[in-house]
Image (spheres, rainbow, N blue to C red):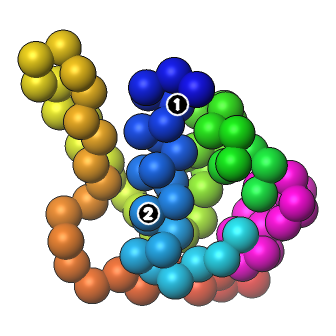
């Protein structure tokens, strides 16, 4: 697995954990905006660390992460999401 795939995988997993969102809940939240994923397909994508930028952004969007930060240090990429704070899942108004 490439360095950036691993960093991106860890970023998505950490944002899910910070918000207390399981892969099952992520599938539910994605379905609320018309994106059909199963827990199993999400497990596989995250486990492999090879998912599309679209899936990454859709996932961050539905869990309420509106900002990520990419820092470039010495040629290596350090990826950090939103600064520390209180996280809450945004409820769909459907």
Above/below status of 27 relative to 42: below
Question: Would you call the spot at circle 1 few (<14 residues within 10 Å), some (14-19), or many (20 or more)?
Answer: some
Q: Which mark is residue 31?
A: none
Q: Residue at x 77, y 57 (%)?
A: 43
What is the CA distance from the residue labelled 2 to the residue labelled 1? 14 Å
Callout 1 secondary element: helix
Q: Residue at x 19, y 71 (%)?
A: 84
Looking at the image, how many numbered discs can be counted on the residues?
2
Q: Residue at x 53, y 45 (%)?
A: 9
Q: Residue at x 58, y 26 (%)?
A: 1
Range of residues picked out in magenta: 24-42
Looking at the magenta stretch, what is its main secondary structure? helix
Above/below status of 54 relative to 65: above
Q: Among all residues in the image, which is located at the extreme left?
A: 74
Expressed as whole percent of the image width and height from the top left, the position of residue 21 reads 59, 78
The one of 62 and 1 positioned closer to us in this rendering: 1
Expressed as whole percent of the image width and height from the top left, the position of residue 32 reads 77, 71
Residue 41 on the magenta span: yes
Name which of mark 2 and mark 1 comes first in the sequence. 1
Can you identify the residue that label 2 sits on?
A: 14
The one of 94 and 79 positioned closer to us in this rendering: 79
Callout 2 secondary element: helix
- Quadrant hosting residue 71: top left
Residue 18 left/right relative to 92:
left
- Quadrant hosting residue 31: bottom right
Q: Name the quadrant of the C terminus.
A: bottom right
Expressed as whole percent of the image width and height from the top left, the position of residue 65 reads 41, 62
Residue 73 on the magenta span: no
Q: Which mark is residue 5?
A: 1
Query: Is any part of residue 92 visible from this angle?
Result: yes
Question: Would you call the spot at circle 2 few (<14 residues within 10 Å), some (14-19), or many (20 or more)?
Answer: some
Query: Is any part of residue 61 visible from this angle?
Result: no
């Amino acid at each position: 697995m490439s360095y950036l795939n691993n960093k991106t995988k860890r970023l998505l997993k950490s944002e899910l954990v910070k918000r207390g969102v399981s892969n099952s809940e992520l599938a539910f939240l994605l379905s609320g905006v018309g994106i059909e994923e199963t827990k199993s397909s999400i497990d596989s994508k995250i486990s492999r660390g090879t998912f599309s930028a679209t899936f990454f952004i859709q996932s961050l969007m539905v869990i309420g992460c509106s900002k990520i930060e990419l820092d470039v240090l010495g040629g290596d990429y350090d990826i950090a999401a939103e600064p520390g704070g209180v996280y809450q899942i945004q409820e769909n108004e459907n």
